[in-house]
Image (cartoon, rainbow, N blue to C red):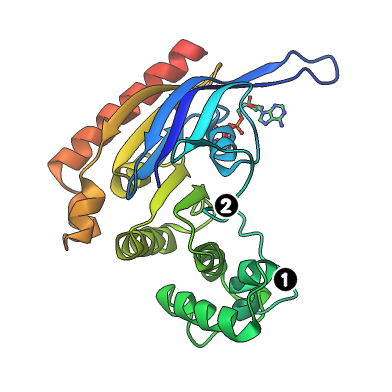
Amino acid sequence: MALQIRQASVEFPAVDGRAPVEALRKIELSIEPGDFTVALGASGCGKSTLLNLIAGFLSPSSGAILLDGAPVNGPGADRSVVFQKHALLPWLNVRDNVAFGLKLQGSSKAERYAVAEKFIALLGLSGFETSPVYSLSGGMQQRVGIARALTCDPKLLLMDEPLGALDALTRERAQELILKIWSETEKSVFFITHSVEEALFMGTKLVVMSPRPGRIAHMFDLPFSRRFCDGQSARSIKASGDFIALREKVLAIIFADEEEAA
Ligand SMILES: Nc1ncnc2c1ncn2[C@@H]1O[C@H](COP(=O)(O)OP(=O)(O)OP(=O)(O)O)[C@@H](O)[C@H]1O
């Protein structure tokens, strides 16, 4: 599934006497099958607005969002969203949370539990099927959220800072897990983060955005996630000279953009 964003702008109307907000200006971006596109940028530069456009939660004020050439008119089962706060249903156990999307689609209990089982295992949650989600750690709850997003077999997984609330060690493990799932399922991913290191490690394509108005300031093709999927360790990738050099380059760009915008 290919997604094209063509000259898309979003302006939020004036509310309570405040000026309208030009959240995105003329965004031009393509996501091809298998791409892992990461959006990085200062707070308020429009990353979540861009994700909401792709998800179909928002319509552009001008321009177009096309999925395989057809305009996106709203949310669809071909796109699933994972939020920073996992938005689980606290009164359901792990299995029923994971199977929830399929229930909404009308699958039988046997069908949805069979699919849920597969993703519970893929996310390393076997043995916790009947645990209430509130009894799990933050990292496990986030994995339940990712398993739930995967059960509907979306072509494009949209992740809005999914690892932002995790401690450093859990976050590194979750990064590796997401890359493993991405390479095994061959899905396309659109991933938002505030961490330059995470962005460089995870993405095949990096989109650096700048604020006021939100726009794409820079784009980079990245090799590191494919190296990880080919067997190189995450630590050795993050400690490599080309990774560190690009990290410093991207940091310098972001700081320069922020100074310019200030
Ligand atoms: N529903 C809304 N109504 C009005 N303004 C909005 C709305 N949603 C977002 N904005 C504004 O649009 C701009 C972009 O917001 P957005 O949440 O997309 O940025 P972001 O890059 O995701 O920020 P963060 O990294 O802090 O999550 C901000 O100035 C924000 O205040």
Q: Going by the picture, which residue comes out furthest to the right?
A: 16
Query: What element does badge 2 sit on?
Result: loop
Secondary structure, mark 1, is loop
Whichever of callouts 1 and 2 sits on the residue coming sooner in the sequence is 2
Q: Residue at x 16, y 59 (%)?
A: 232
Where 95 sits versus 160, above or below? below
Q: Position of residue 79 (x, y in %)?
A: 53, 51
User: Residue at (72%, 15%) from the top-left corner?
Assistant: 20
Amino acid at the residue labelled 2: Gln
Task: Examine the rendering and report whether any part of residue 131 can be seen.
Answer: no
Residue at 17%, 60% (x, y): give it: 230
Query: Vertical placement of 121 versus 51: above or below?
Result: below
Q: Residue at x 46, y 24 (%)?
A: 6
Give the labeled residue for mark 1.
90
Out of 171 and 115, give the one closest to the viewer: 115
- Disc 1 marks a residue whose amino acid type is Pro
- According to the picture, the residue beneath numbered tag 2 turns out to be 84
Decide if residue 196 is on the left or right side of residue 72.
left
Q: Nearer the viewer, residue 215 or 6?
A: 6
Percent across and percent down for residue 121 are 43, 80
